[in-house]
């Protein structure tokens, strides 16, 4: 696996690919960690195929917690030993996924997290820092 490393003078496309690589590594880490440390037979974390999307080169999904949190990853992304599972996406949208994450983490940075996040998610990409959380306001990363 080639490790992404930021270098001065990288193109915007290279930086975007690097951000996706870092996100993919965190999702892979979470899935593997949960499998190794919190496995109780009820929570399934793994990799599955996804024939329903039309994104060439992004036909695989890392699924966490029985399909509650699904992340498309590039077909060429090395997943090491993550188990292959049957597709189990529960139908959530990207917004649903991040609302669930905020609820699970009990992040109380907004008075009304769902309403405030909806306002923030569809603005141009930039970083929002509130207290101990830093999140991207762009809905496609």
Image (cartoon, rainbow, N blue to C red):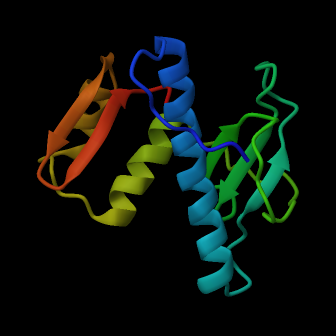
Residue drawn at x 52%, y 43% as measured from the top left: 22
In terms of image quadrants, where is residue 8? top left
Can the viewer see residue 68 in this picture? no
Can the viewer see residue 63 in this picture? yes
List x then y, in percent, for residue 76: 81, 36
Q: Is residue 131 left or right of residue 53?
A: left
Above or below 79: residue 20: above
Nearest the eye: 57 or 14? 14
Above or below 138: residue 40: below
Q: How many marks?
A: 0
List x then y, in percent, for residue 16: 50, 23
Above or below 32: residue 20: above
List x then y, in percent, for residue 61: 74, 44
List x then y, in percent, for residue 136: 33, 33
Q: Is residue 72 left or right of residue 50?
A: left
Residue drawn at x 58%, y 38% as measured from the top left: 21
Nearest the eye: 140 or 99? 140
Residue drawn at x 68%, y 38% as measured from the top left: 72
Residue drawn at x 69%, y 55% as measured from the top left: 63
Nearest the eye: 13 or 101? 13
């Amino acid at each position: 696996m080639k490790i992404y490393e930021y270098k001065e003078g990288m193109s915007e496309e290279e930086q975007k690919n690097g951000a996706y690589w870092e996100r993919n590594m965190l999702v892979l880490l979470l899935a593997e960690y949960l499998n190794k440390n919190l496995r109780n037979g009820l929570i399934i974390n793994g990799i599955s195929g996804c024939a329903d999307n039309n994104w060439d080169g992004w036909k695989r999904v890392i699924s966490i917690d029985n399909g509650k949190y699904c992340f498309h990853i590039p077909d060429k992304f090395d997943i090491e030993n993550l188990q292959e599972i049957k597709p189990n996406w529960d139908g959530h949208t990207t917004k649903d996924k991040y609302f669930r994450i905020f609820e699970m983490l009990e992040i109380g940075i907004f008075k009304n997290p769902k309403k405030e996040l909806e306002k923030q998610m569809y603005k141009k990409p930039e970083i929002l820092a509130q207290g101990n959380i830093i999140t991207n306001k762009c809905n496609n990363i």
